[in-house]
Amino acid sequence: MRKLPLTVAVLALAAAACGGNTTPEPAQSSGAPAAKPLAGVKIEVAAKWTGDEQANFEKVLKAFQDKTGATVTYASTGEDTGAYLGPRIQGGNPPDVAILPQPGLVQQYADQNALKPLAPEVQAQIDQNYTPYWKELGSASGQVYGVLVKAAHKSLIWYRQTAFDDAGAQPAETWDDLIGKTAQTLADSGTPPFAMCAASGWTLTDLFENVYLSSAGPENYDKLAKHEIPWTDPSVTTALEKMAQIFGKQEFMLGGSSGALQTDFPTCVTQTYAQKKAAMVIEADFVAASLGQTGAQVGQEAKIMPFPKAGDTAPVVLGGDVAVVMKDSKGAQALVEYLASKEGGEVWAKQPGYLSPNRNVSPDNYPDDLTKQLAQTIISAGESVRYDMSDLAPSAFGGTDGKGEWKDLQDFLRNPSDVKGAQAKLEADAAKAFTE
């Protein structure tokens, strides 16, 4: 992995504040503290996090405050970030920095002239530490407005070790092995391979995205995400046919299709690890937070396999949160620059429940072996890493319960033999949402 020096922009500000003279002043040499470049500056940052996630983020903010002298206030938006930010934007009093849960909001707020372009110093950090894909993801109309600062790894399958041991099953590296060997071996032993969380429609979009990225490749993934190719494209046919290899076998899903469609997330985690009714859950790293009272320990009873290759690409699909500047305040750009830097990422990486999309944050910073493993897969995937496709789409198609892609994939699970019908419905709903 390429090593790059720590960001120097804030230190440069410190030097400028001292007149650019690198020779220690007498007061400094006698033990006085060095000048802080943002002393007296107040910054407000808003994000959805509460509880442990908020506490961990506040440790990053403290490191920034200690470094710069700024005073940073955190405001929680709650789960509906738009409902919180909308009135504040309209009232002319947005936070200095907001961290958005969906990249699509970058375009939305840019269209409202609610964002400030990222400063050259911030863009320099992005160029050093991120692949070009992430820079494009945070851009609108040729301007860079946002940087992905926290990631969720969605290309995983969690499995219960004792179920695998009892059946003689092994983790799979390819989709064909997952279906033909691992799942079939488990089903033959009397244990349903999958607890599907299909009542939560977004879990089915996650499954589709992994199969599609792997089988169709990153370029087609980008085109479909922007609706530059239709959902009736043969590449979508291939992905849905592979998903039908699970959906079409009732014995592969706990409770069959009916049971799958009545099970939400995280009930599927409870079914697998507490009730021991199934062997696998197809979902992101945040399954770990749902293990709770199941008694399953990560790395022991609860293990992961990378999402098996369904084509030429080993899929790595990320969700995550994008930092944007909403006020042209003195400290806002400096805070986002810090969050985008290797230094800021490594402070955050030492806290549990965090993954960095920053390719120069060493996996050695993470507190446990699982997170180190996930971080390494992000780095190793390089240019082929992609963001959750449904979160890039208009919410009417990719993010609304009972509508669009969520409902269409649930209907496909009910009737997996009708691939063409599912594609026609997906295309009709996508076309409508992308033109509204």
Image (tube, rainbow, N blue to C red):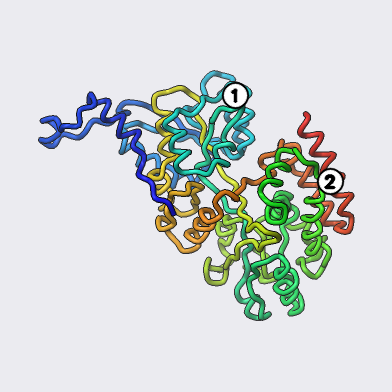
Q: Is residue 16 left or right of residue 425?
A: left
Could you say where residue 220 lies in the image, as x and y percent from the top left? 71, 46
- Depth check: 375 or 280 in front? 375
Q: Which residue has dot 1 on it? A: 87
Residue 185 against residue 97 in the figure, above or below: below
Which quarter of the rendering shows the C terminus?
top right
Cα distance between the residues tagged 2 and 1: 40 Å
**Residue 232 tag number:** 2
Whether residue 59 is visible: no
Q: What's the amino acid at mark 1?
A: Pro
Left/right placement of residue 417 relative to residue 71 reads right
Residue at x 40% of width, y 43% of height: 344
| Quadrant placement of the N terminus | bottom left
Residue type highlighted by circle 2: Thr
Residue 347 drawn at (x, y percent): 39, 47
- Graded by Cα atoms within 10 Å as few (under 14), some (14 to 19) or many (20 or more), the crowding at tag 2 reads some
Contact? badges 2 and 1 (CB < 8 Å): no
Residue sitting nearer the eye, 234 or 178 = 234
Q: Residue at x 89, y 55 (%)?
A: 418
Q: Residues within 10 Å of mark 1 (few under 14, many from 20)?
A: few
Tell me which residue sits at (80%, 42%) in the image: 230
What is the x, y in percent for residue 380? 52, 56
